Amino acid sequence: MKTLTYLPTLLALTIQVMVSGQTQDNQAHKIRIDIMGPKEPVKMNYTNSNITISMAEYTQLLEQVNSLKINAKKLRDEATVVEIQSLCKQIQASEFSEKISLQTFETNRGIILDLFTKVPKNNISYTKAQSSYSESERFMKLAKEMREEANAQLTMQAKYGDMTNAEEKETLALSKQEETLNLLKGKISQLTKHVVFADVSNQAISSSFENLLVLATRQAHDIKITAQQLRLSALNTGPNQKMILQDEAAALENDYLAKQLEISALKSKVDYSRFNENRKAIALLMEQVTNENIRNKAADINAEAERLMKIGKEMREEANAQLTLTAKIGAMSNAQENELFAMGKQQESLQMLDKGSLKAVVASR
């Protein structure tokens, strides 16, 4: 009897549970759990570890990765800029090296050709010297051809590579010239019983400073023009290229200032050399002039020249102690002005003594 009472009750409960399970929300929840499993944080499993991170942490990691990528690209761009600037400098240095080598080569060639006329052809020294001279000419010809090929290259890397090869050939050419000079001078010294080549050496030394001055002046002009062209080119380029061109122009402008200092120093050496020559000439003329009045006036003028040149030297020492290129150039300009005044006073003294010397000659006739 009790069993019959329980059965309807159990049946009613079972139907209720079944109906409840068939509602839309509960059915959807069950399907989601069956397919996706219970809602949990994202899990990343590795071989020997079990690391669990949230979506927020995962997003943060992605942002860090992107930031590192941007920084890496920026560093690569900066490295490219530095590499280009370095190559530009190296190419510029190589071009200057070429000019110096060619100037030295031409000077040596003139001396060598003069010495060849003083050495007999029927001896071993002449033959060896001629062979070395031919080698020097061949190496310099190869260097010039390599320079032409370098200028035709499309990339700076290739251009600099060819220029480096050309520099090696230029060095070999100058080395062979030195070998030729030593052979010729040695043979002439034997033939003339150790006669010193004073005339050849003095002539070469007196003109060397002037040659270097001409070369430095030409280089300064080229640097200035190149810097101006870079500034103009930068006006019509994108931001990155503009920065590269402006930096290169600024570097060249700084090189131009340094070259101006070099020019000033070379000018002073040329002036000092001429000043010493004039000093010797004045001393000789002083002995020839008998007019006491002319001699005294010339001596006073010459003393003023010596004073101005001394001040010029002191100014150059002060200029070298300056901390900036601009300040050095300013002080050097003042020194050079004093040196020019000194040279002018010397010329005035020389002219006065020269006239006095001519009058003495006429009077003696």
Image: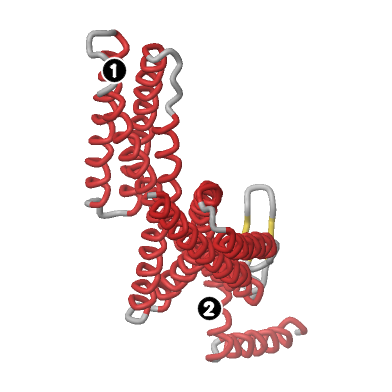
Q: Nearer the viewer, residue 138 or 177?
A: 177
Residue 213 against residue 345 in the figure, above or below:
above
Quadrant of the image containing the N terminus: bottom right
Q: Is residue 27 above or below residue 331?
A: below
Judged from this view, the residue extending furthest toward the top is 123
Image side of residue 283 versus residue 7, left or right = left
Give the side of residue 231 with respect to residue 9, left or right. left
Q: How many residues crowd mark 2 within 10 Å: few (<14), some (14–19), many (20+)?
A: few
Q: Secondary structure at mark 1?
A: loop
Which is nearer the N-term, disc 2 or disc 1? 2
Label drawn at residue 218: none
Q: Which residue is mark 2?
A: 31
| Number of numbered markers | 2
Q: Is residue 299 left or right of residue 248?
A: right
**Which quadrant of the view contains residue 321?**
bottom right
Question: From the viewer's perspective, is residue 126 above or below residue 74?
Answer: above
The image shows residue 49 at horizontal and vertical percentages of 69, 52
Give whichever of 325, 2 is nearer the camera: 325
Q: Nearer the viewer, residue 259 or 287?
A: 287
Residue that mark 1 sits on: 119
Question: Which amino acid type is shown beneath numbered disc 1?
Answer: Val
The structure residue drawn at horizontal position 41% and vertical position 75%, both measured from the top left corner, is 242
Neighbor class of circle 1 (other Cα within 10 Å; few <14, some 14-19, many 20+) is: some
Q: Amino acid at mark 2?
A: Ile
Residue depicted at 38% across the width and 22% down the height: 179
- Residue 116 quadrant: top left
